[in-house]
Image (cartoon, rainbow, N blue to C red):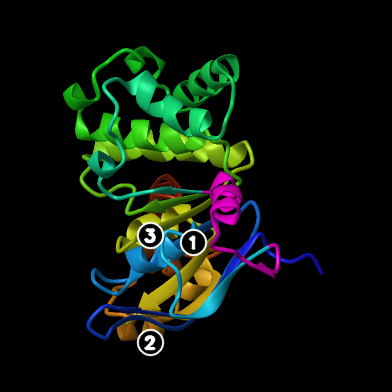
Amino acid sequence: MTAPPLAVRGLEYTYPGGIAALRDLDLTVERGRKLVILGPNGSGKTTLLLHLNGTFRPTRGEVLLDGCPAGYDRHALNQWRRRVGLVLQEPDDQLFAATVGQDVSFGPLNLGLTALETRERVGEALAALRIADLADRATHTLSFGQKKRVAIAGILAMRPEILVLDEPTAGLDPHGVVHLLNALQRLHDAGTTLVFSTHDVELAYAWADQAAIFQDGTVLRQGETTAVLADRELLQRARLRPPLLLELTQLLPGPLLRSREAVLAQLQERLRVNQ
């Protein structure tokens, strides 16, 4: 059986002062899936994500790449971060160059690519996020949503196999959420494995293939999204409420529906039949 591209086993992390953030945590990232790390604020989700690309080193336990323990020397970290890209919740924490094009160029140039190869990757990343028109814009003039997409483009230009995003929709208005999720879906359709954290159960239910319920620094359960989010006792332990969309579709005959449009269509059909 092929090992997953990324996994953590028995992960523990303690901040200075003895504050335990992660406790005996297991997680598996399967190739080609969209995995949501779902839990309340302050449960340690960001700390976990910072381990997935080697930013943090565990106090105990290990991170596995293709089944092998990841290394933390400079060469190993560079290879690791070529494969696993991390996008932080606050885009200003990642944007530092004067213009969008310069910022997105930083990663490829740091990989040692030529100017021509870098231009190709920058153009490809900006096009994928549909922000090619922003290439010459000063980063400080961008909206919050534009900054989010530029931050993702900067990681995407390094062509990671796995894209890890910390609360990707936080701070976005509904229009911005739709634009961002559409962009991420295109990346996923092109073969990128996605891992993202959120406390939004509605987003998790509608969009993720797999869910890992996170609470007090550990994963309570990981599995297919519909099965995990249908476990009311589990959600209660994690101080989460079941998604409204799931509750509605459970009242309807047939398979569980994952989109708002599908549920509304089913309800309308039921009303028409019963008239």
Residue projecting furthest to the right: 1
Q: Earlier in the sequence, mark 3 or mark 1?
A: 1
Say what amino acid the circle numbered 2 marks: Glu
In the picture, measured across the screen, residue 137 lies left or right of residue 226, that is: left
Give the quarter of the figure containing the N terminus. Answer: bottom right
Q: Residue at left 49%, top 22%?
A: 122
Give yes or no for residue 81 being in the magenta stretch: yes
Packing grade of label 3 (10 A; few <14, some 14-19, many >=20) is many
Q: Which mark is residue 197?
A: 3
Could you tell me residue 49's position as x and y percent?
A: 42, 62
> What stretch of residues is rendered in magenta?
66-84
Q: Residue at left 43%, top 46%?
A: 265
Near-viewer residue (96 or 29): 96
Q: Give the Cα distance between marks 2 and 3.
A: 21 Å
Q: Give the Cα distance between marks 1 and 2.
A: 28 Å
Near-viewer residue (115 or 254): 115
Could you tell me residue 24's position as x and y percent?
A: 47, 86
* Residue labelled with disc 2: 233
Which of the two marks, 3 or 1, is nearer to us in this view?
1
**Is 156 placed above or below 83 here?**
above
Q: Earlier in the sequence, mark 2 or mark 3?
A: 3
Say what amino acid the circle numbered 1 marks: Leu
Could you tell me residue 237's position as x and y percent?
A: 33, 86
Indicate the secondary structure of the residue bearing disc 1: helix
* Residue labelled with disc 1: 52
